[in-house]
Image: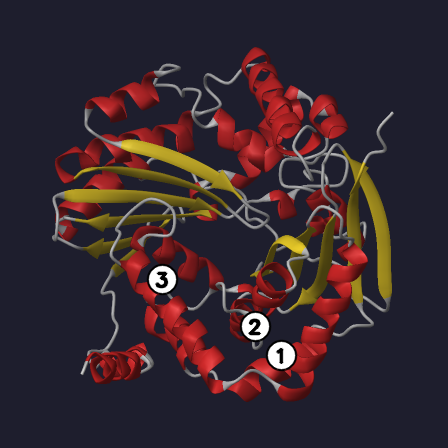
């Protein structure tokens, strides 16, 4: 009897989640644009008395120039250092006093700032965001820039230069992208560029990119649309429009062969990185490569994890992921050898599994398991209003990508509509053995 119950339960668990979701997936919103160009998106979710204020500036490290890298990330720090009507240190104090919190992040393509707080404190969040958008330069000084410049330099040391395997990602970007491509330099910037940047350089960068016509504001949560629109107009309406920002026009990025390199680092175990150039986010093949990564390393029964870590026990860990961007993406496999084993052993097994995937494709069960995992994660993120990855952030992400703020159903369908042949085709097209980057990090010789 217990066995029949178990078999029945397993049958239920293998049913596609999409088949159990009859209601259409919609996130209703209202959208308008201020006279100064600020894009505003509002979404009402009264499930709890909370609100998320989410601002995207359409500026990331891809908007920087060679020799002047790291500016976008530097401003992520400077935006918390006070503005004309909000003294230094008061931004966090005021939000914490109202029961809120905030954060920010920088990528190649954008900088975003998130505030989560009780809905009765919405006006405070709008006041704070508008003040640093419109009046940051009123209090920014060479001394303040130098202070945050030193903070960023220290962050670079901690996150890259003094972290095990930390320089690998910087080297991979150099190998994958042409030197003139803005994805070839790290978001945090180069140390010499941070040192060389003048106060005037920084001011010019802010004036160009941190203007309302280069930003999008999402307000999601327990809100009244009319009152919220009036508050947005009150606090953001007087900020002047900036000059138009030209789109980034990167050179073509193509791998014509295999590039190999070996780095030494203060690590105990050797690590292998395999990387390919792949289609930009939301382009055909992007979602199939997400599923490919899950088939290869998504869980203990995935192909590479099972062989390398569990069966053969020659790898300490292995992961694969599609790192999507607006100008292009990279697919990466990262594996760390166990003590006494080499990256050559790992690469042999990885290539065997990639060849098998290209030749035979994944099974229907593998693809459905990956889709189920992604669908569960998708709905879990939708349950959150704020923070990174919540509905407010996602509305801004879809607006930035050009699909419209309520692109949730279409985004999910990119995955639920995939068949094993789509994954096989993506592996054949985008993960060839003869056009990729191979980077190995080995331990420094002991003296």
284 to the left or right of 165 = left
Q: Secondary structure at mark 3?
A: helix
Across and down, in percent, residue 332 comes to 65, 60
Q: Which residue is mark 3?
A: 377
Name the quarter where the C terminus is drawn: top right
Residue at the extreme top of the image, as rendered: 143
Residue 96: numbered disc: none
Question: To which residue does mark 2 refer?
Answer: 292
Viewer can see residue 239: no
| Disc 3 to disc 2, C-alpha distance | 17 Å
The span from disc 1 to disc 3 (Cα, nearest Å) is 22 Å
Residue 399 visible here? yes
In the image, residue 23 above or below residue 438: below
Whether the residues at callouts 1 and 2 have beta carbons within 8 Å, the answer is yes
Distance (Cα) linking label 1 and label 2: 8 Å
| 444, 228: nearer the viewer | 444
- Circle 2 packing at 10 Å, graded few (<14), some (14-19), many (20+), is many
Compared across the picture, whether 262 is left or right of 375 comes to: right
* Residue 56 horizontal/vertical position (percent): 43, 46
Q: What residue would you read off at disc 1?
A: 426
Task: Out of 393 and 131, give the one closest to the viewer.
Answer: 393
Disc 3 crowd rating (10 Å Cα; few below 14, some 14-19, many 20+) is few
**Mark 1 residue crowding within 10 angstroms, few (<14) / some (14–19) / many (20+):** many
Figure check: 314 above or below 444: below
The reply to whether callout 3 and callout 2 are in contact (CB within 8 Å) is: no
Kindly identify the residue that appears in the image at 62 percent across and 22 percent down.
154
């Amino acid at each position: 009897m217990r066995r029949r119950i178990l078999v029945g339960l397993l049958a239920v668990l293998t049913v596609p989640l999409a088949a159990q979701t009859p209601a259409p997936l919609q996130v209703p919103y209202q959208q308008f644009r201020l006279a100064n160009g600020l894009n505003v998106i509002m979404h009402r979710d009264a499930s709890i008395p909370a609100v998320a204020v989410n601002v995207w500036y359409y500026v990331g490290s891809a908007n920087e120039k060679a020799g002047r890298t790291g500016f976008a990330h530097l401003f992520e720090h400077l935006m918390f250092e006070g503005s004309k009507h909000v003294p230094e240190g008061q931004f966090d104090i005021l939000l914490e006093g109202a029961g809120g919190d905030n954060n920010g992040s920088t990528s190649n393509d954008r900088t975003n700032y998130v505030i989560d707080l009780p809905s009765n404190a919405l006006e405070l969040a709008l006041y704070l965001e508008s003040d640093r958008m419109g009046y940051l330069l009123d209090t920014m000084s060479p001394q303040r820039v130098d202070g945050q410049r030193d903070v960023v330099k220290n962050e670079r040391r901690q996150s890259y230069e003094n972290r095990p395997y930390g320089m690998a990602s910087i080297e991979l970007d150099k190998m994958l992208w042409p030197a003139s491509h803005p994805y070839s330099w790290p978001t945090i910037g180069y140390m010499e560029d941070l040192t060389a940047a003048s106060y005037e350089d920084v001011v010019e960068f802010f004036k160009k990119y941190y203007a309302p016509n280069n930003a999008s504001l999402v307000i999601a949560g327990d809100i009244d649309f009319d009152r919220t629109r009036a508050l947005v107009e009150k606090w953001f309406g007087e900020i002047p429009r900036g000059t138009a920002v030209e789109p980034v026009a990167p050179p073509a990025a193509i791998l014509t062969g295999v590039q190999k390199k070996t780095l030494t680092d203060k690590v105990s175990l050797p690590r292998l990185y395999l990387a390919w150039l792949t289609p930009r986010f939301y382009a055909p093949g992007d979602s199939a490569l997400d599923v490919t990564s899950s088939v290869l390393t998504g869980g203990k029964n995935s192909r590479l994890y099972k062989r390398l870590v569990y069966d053969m026990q020659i790898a300490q860990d292995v992961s694969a992921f599609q790192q999507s961007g607006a100008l292009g993406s990279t697919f990466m496999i990262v594996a760390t050898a166990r003590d006494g084993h080499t990256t050559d052993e790992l690469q042999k097994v990885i290539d065997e599994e990639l060849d098998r995937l290209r030749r035979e494709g994944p099974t229907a069960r593998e693809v459905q398991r990956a889709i189920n995992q992604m669908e569960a994660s998708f709905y879990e993120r939708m349950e959150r209003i704020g923070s990174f990855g919540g509905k407010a952030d996602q509305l801004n992400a879809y607006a930035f990508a050009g699909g419209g703020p309520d692109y949730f159903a279409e985004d999910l369908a990119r995955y639920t509509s995939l068949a094993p042949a789509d994954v096989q085709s993506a592996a054949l097209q985008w993960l060839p053995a003869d056009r990729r980057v191979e980077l190995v990090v080995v331990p420094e010789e002991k003296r």
